[in-house]
Image (cartoon, rainbow, N blue to C red):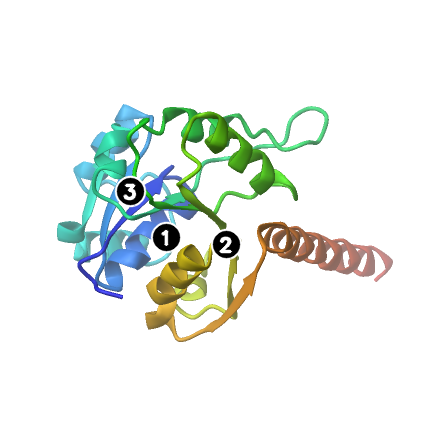
């Protein structure tokens, strides 16, 4: 895929900023959008609001390929692939709060073209079907929705992004899946192509397995 491609990242938190910086390192132009003006101002000034080893240097080195904005149109009018990286914190019930994800769908301009909308936020199984229904209801059924879960560990996030064990792409639109595969081709990793629900389940299972491993070793430590 041409490195003249423009990528959008909506939500410049931990996952969003790491992903944006790494895509820029691969040579892509990346437009990042966040709703917090102070965060955008800091990033434009080169101040990194989170700590991750190597991230500040990566952002600085790729400053010409990275831009930051609060305007969603700056993303939709330039980018052909848009990553959703907003927070989905747990609610009191334990369910994921999808309000920020739904807000992204609500804020997409009515004239948004046939972009690929890639979900990186951690969402429960079935979210893709729900998001597609919201897109259809807004007359944006032509937006190509895919699930592209992240598997980043704090402290090793850049290495995890640049040398992933696998890249999961879930979708029903073969054009979108192929665009995503080409986008990630420079990473030279195994690409797992699935439907959306399976991609969401892979992320859920990965998180559950990690939590299980931590729980078991904590119990072993207590016994010891």
Indicate the quadrant containing the N terminus: top left, top right, bottom left or bottom right.
Answer: bottom left
- Residue beneath disc 3: 48
Indicate the quadrant containing the C terminus: top left, top right, bottom left or bottom right.
Answer: bottom right
Mark 2 residue crowding within 10 angstroms, few (<14) / some (14–19) / many (20+): many
Nearest to N terminus: mark 2 or mark 1: 1
Residue 195 on image: x %, y %: 59, 55
- Residue beneath disc 1: 19
Nearest to N terminus: mark 2 or mark 3: 3
Image position of 143 with respect to 167: above or below: above
Q: Locate residue 206 relative to residue 44 in the image: left or right.
A: right
Residue 10 on image: x %, y %: 36, 38
Q: Locate residue 195 relative to residue 210 in the image: left or right.
A: left
Image position of 131 with respect to 213: above or below: above
Can the viewer see residue 158? no
Q: CA distance from mark 2 to mark 1?
A: 9 Å
Nearest to N terminus: mark 3 or mark 1: 1
Q: Which type of secondary structure does the marked residue at label 2 adopt?
A: loop
Check contact, mark 2 vs mark 1: CB within 8 A.
yes
Occupied quadrant, residue 214: bottom right
Q: Locate residue 101 relative to residue 21 in the image: left or right.
A: right
Q: CA distance from mark 2 to mark 3?
A: 21 Å
Mark 3 residue crowding within 10 angstroms, few (<14) / some (14–19) / many (20+): some
- Residue beneath disc 2: 150
Residue 80 on image: x %, y %: 28, 48
Residue 132 on image: x %, y %: 52, 37
Q: Which type of secondary structure does the marked residue at label 1 adopt?
A: helix
């Amino acid at each position: 895929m041409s490195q003249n491609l423009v990528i959008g990242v909506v939500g410049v938190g931990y996952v969003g900023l790491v992903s944006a910086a790494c895509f820029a390192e691969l040579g892509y132009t990346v437009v990042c959008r966040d709703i917090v003006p102070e965060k955008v101002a800091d990033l434009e000034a080169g101040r990194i609001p989170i700590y991750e080893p190597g991230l500040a240097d990566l952002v600085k080195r790729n400053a010409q390929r990275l831009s930051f904005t609060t305007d969603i149109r700056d993303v939709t009018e330039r980018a052909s692939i848009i990553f959703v990286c907003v927070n989905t914190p747990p609610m009191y019930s334990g369910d994921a709060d999808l309000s920020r994800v739904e807000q992204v769908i609500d804020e997409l301009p009515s004239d948004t073209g046939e972009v690929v909308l890639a979900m990186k936020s951690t969402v429960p199984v079935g979210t893709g079907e729900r998001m597609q229904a919201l897109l259809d209801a807004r007359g944006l059924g032509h937006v190509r929705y895919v699930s592209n879960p992240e598997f980043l560990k704090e402290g090793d996030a850049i290495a995890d992004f640049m040398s992933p064990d696998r890249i999961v792409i879930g979708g029903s639109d073969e054009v979108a899946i192929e665009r995503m595969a080409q986008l990630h081709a420079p990473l030279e990793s195994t690409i797992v192509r699935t439907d959306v629900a399976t991609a969401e389940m892979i992320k859920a299972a990965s998180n559950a397995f990690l939590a299980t491993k931590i729980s078991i070793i904590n119990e072993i430590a207590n016994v010891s």
